[in-house]
Amino acid sequence: MSGNVSGLLGSGLVLQNNAGDDLPIAANGNFSFPTQLVSGAGYAVTIRSQSRILTRVCTVSNGTGTVANAAVTNVAVNCAAPAARFAYAPNYASNNLFPYTVDASTGALGTAGPMVETGNGPIAIAVDPEGRFAYVANQGDNNVWVYRVDAGTGMLSPMPVPPAATGTAPNAITVDPTGRFAYVANTNSGDVSAYTIDASTGALSPMATPLVRAGASPYSITVDPTGRFAYVANTGSNDVSAYTIDANTGALSPMTTPTVGAGANPNSITVDPTGRFAYVANTNSNNVSAYSIDASTGALSPMATPTVDAGVGPRSIAVDPLGRFAYVANLGDNTVSGYSIDASTGALNPMPTPTVPARSTPVSVTVDPTGRFAYATNNGSKDISAYTIDASTGALSPMAVPTIATGGIGPRCLVLSR
């Protein structure tokens, strides 16, 4: 009894056959159960436990049947990100956020419910990888509010836990792919707040070392897909801070080379889904810095072509879940740039049509977990531009309903949730 596993990230995946014969899976590739079945015996391969990386869910195909004369070799286990069902856009200037539903077929955004109250200056939002809790960083209050996500409707309800204090002027928040830790980049205090997440309540508790120094004016933070490394784009010092993450405690430790240079005013950083490449949108130099990631240490090294041109004022960058395409929101010329990604080197190559129009002042771009849709958050026009992604070329095309209102003033981003 054998088959193949694809798309796996991290450890913890265990398969079973006939409710027993446990088989831990450490990596993608072929597997074989230790107990061989005789001809005529039934088999039923199931998932006993998922990987600790919760951003992907593993499912079994061709997993049941009866053994014939030939051995069964076609059991397939595929691990992939679940499709998004909900989305949320915080409105910085009106102290609220708008909840959306996401149409699984078309990517269209619909209204999930009434506007949700936030603290003062909600500037960023993150949802844990299982879609149970949402976290809003309130820049005016220097704290994070915690919400429970209704699994059926997607509506957010404030949790009866105190807001978590941050540093000064929190600007970005992220949850690690295991759902156990959260990190906030604090622009004015030049540090990162680090928290553990209560698995039952979603409450944030400061780690033993609650603040870790970053560069000047840290503006964006991301964690690699395996949860081993974290990176912060520092707008004031024009560099990226790099950290290793303790697998047990979530604590951040600066790497041996703690920073690497970026362009002018780096505002956004992302890591591709393979964890091999990182990209930074540099607002004042109108380009994107591209890095290779050392698989062992997480260290960043500039690629052979270290930068690629973007539009005017690139503010945000996102990579599709298959690592084939990248998109940049350019707030200065109201466009989204599109790039194909070289699978071997990670190099960015502008698409034949290098930009598509957005609305006024796009400050964020997001790609859905299936890689079929993209969204640009337009701060000036207070709406979301919605696009479909061509599966072959990555080209963006406006959806049938190309813009969706955010219902508030000063939207800063859009986060998608399962």
Image (tube, rainbow, N blue to C red):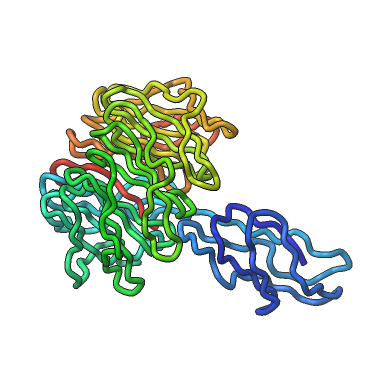
Q: Give the percent coordinates (x, y) of residue 298.
A: 48, 45
Q: Give the percent coordinates (x, y) of residue 102.
A: 36, 51
**The quarter of the displayed image where residue 360 is located:** top left
Q: Give the percent coordinates (x, y) of residue 281.
A: 34, 31
**The quarter of the displayed image where residue 42 is located:** bottom right
Q: Give the percent coordinates (x, y) of residue 1.
A: 77, 67
User: Which residue is found at the position 45% from the left and 25% from the top?
Assistant: 306
Residue nearest the observer in this picture, 215 or 156: 215
| Residue 399 visible | no
The quadrant in which the C terminus is found is bottom left
Query: Compared to 218, does 229 lie above or below?
Result: below
Q: Is residue 306 left or right of residue 238?
A: right
Residue nearest the observer in this picture, 280 or 6: 280
User: Which residue is found at the position 18% from the left and 39% from the top?
Assistant: 382
State the residue lying farthest toward the bottom: 19
| Residue 230 visible | yes
User: Which residue is found at the position 49% from the left and 60% from the top?
Assistant: 53
Q: Is residue 31 left or right of residue 302?
A: right
User: Which residue is found at the position 52% from the left and 60% from the top?
Assistant: 57
